[in-house]
Image: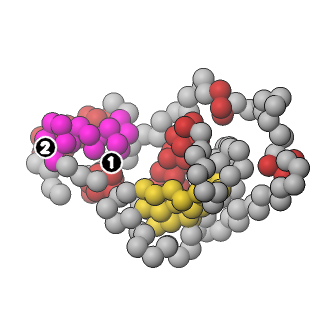
């Protein structure tokens, strides 16, 4: 996808305003009639040699607070009858696996069949899931426990951490 100079200048303005890739993707469709997948929008920004600014974490997110609630167990292994969660391994292909926050994202060394890139995520409550990004830019999350739905705040943190890990890997 090639943009003319005026369109490229407009996209640069959006980056300077601090817009995220998804917001730019929406603006491209609304203002220029250019419909792109998320991945195509990221590649377009890369072609224009632009980097979206990472959003600063929100201060008032109670689910992500540093102190656990009194009713919640201190760790997943503290729950009676449950096995301790296996730590994610850090490797050159796994820069985000150490888990700097409550949500830890790792990359698979070999992507799942049909996926451009895939990996695993551990949510703040200790539940794990697989994730994959296909060639159309669609994100899929596959929980280990049937019917599990992660907290909404965890999903926002997961997407931010995933974007960070993928950008460090050149995606």
99 to 19, vertically: above or below:
below
Q: Which residue shows up at 81% across the image and 31% down it? A: 71
The stretch in magenta equals 19-34
Observer-nearest residue: 110 or 5? 110
- Quarter of the rendering occupied by the N terminus: bottom left
Q: Which residue shows up at 87% across the image and 54% down it? A: 81
Q: Quadrant of residue 88?
A: bottom right
Q: Quadrant of residue 22?
A: top left
- Quarter of the rendering occupied by the C terminus: bottom left
- Per the rendering, the mark at residue 33 is 2
Spot occupied by residue 85 in the image (x, y as percentages of width and height): 77, 58
Q: Which residue shows up at 47% across the image and 40% down it? A: 54
Observer-nearest residue: 62 or 97? 62
Spot occupied by residue 107 in the image (x, y as percentages of width and height): 56, 65
Q: Is residue 68 left or right of residue 78?
A: left
* Of labels 2 and 1, the one closer to you: 2
- Per the rendering, the mark at residue 50 is 1
Observer-nearest residue: 101 or 123? 123
Give the CA distance from mark 2 to mark 1: 21 Å
In this view, the residue farthest toward the front is 147
């Amino acid at each position: 996808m090639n943009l003319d100079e005026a369109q490229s200048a407009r996209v640069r303005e959006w980056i300077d305003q601090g817009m995220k890739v998804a917001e730019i993707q929406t603006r491209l469709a609304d203002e220029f009639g250019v419909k792109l997948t998320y991945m195509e929008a990221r590649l377009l920004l890369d072609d224009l040699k632009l980097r979206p600014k990472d959003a600063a974490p929100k201060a008032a997110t109670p689910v992500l607070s540093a102190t656990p609630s009194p009713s919640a167990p201190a760790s997943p292994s503290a729950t009676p009858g449950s096995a301790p969660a296996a730590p994610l391994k850090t490797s050159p292909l796994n820069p985000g696996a150490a888990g700097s926050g409550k949500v830890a994202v790792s990359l698979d060394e070999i992507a799942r069949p049909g996926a451009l890139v895939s990996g695993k995520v551990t949510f703040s409550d200790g539940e794990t899931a697989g994730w994959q990004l296909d060639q159309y830019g669609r994100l899929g999350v596959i929980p280990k426990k049937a019917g599990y739905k992660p907290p909404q705040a965890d999903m926002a943190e997961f997407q931010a951490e995933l974007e960070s890990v993928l950008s460090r890997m050149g995606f």
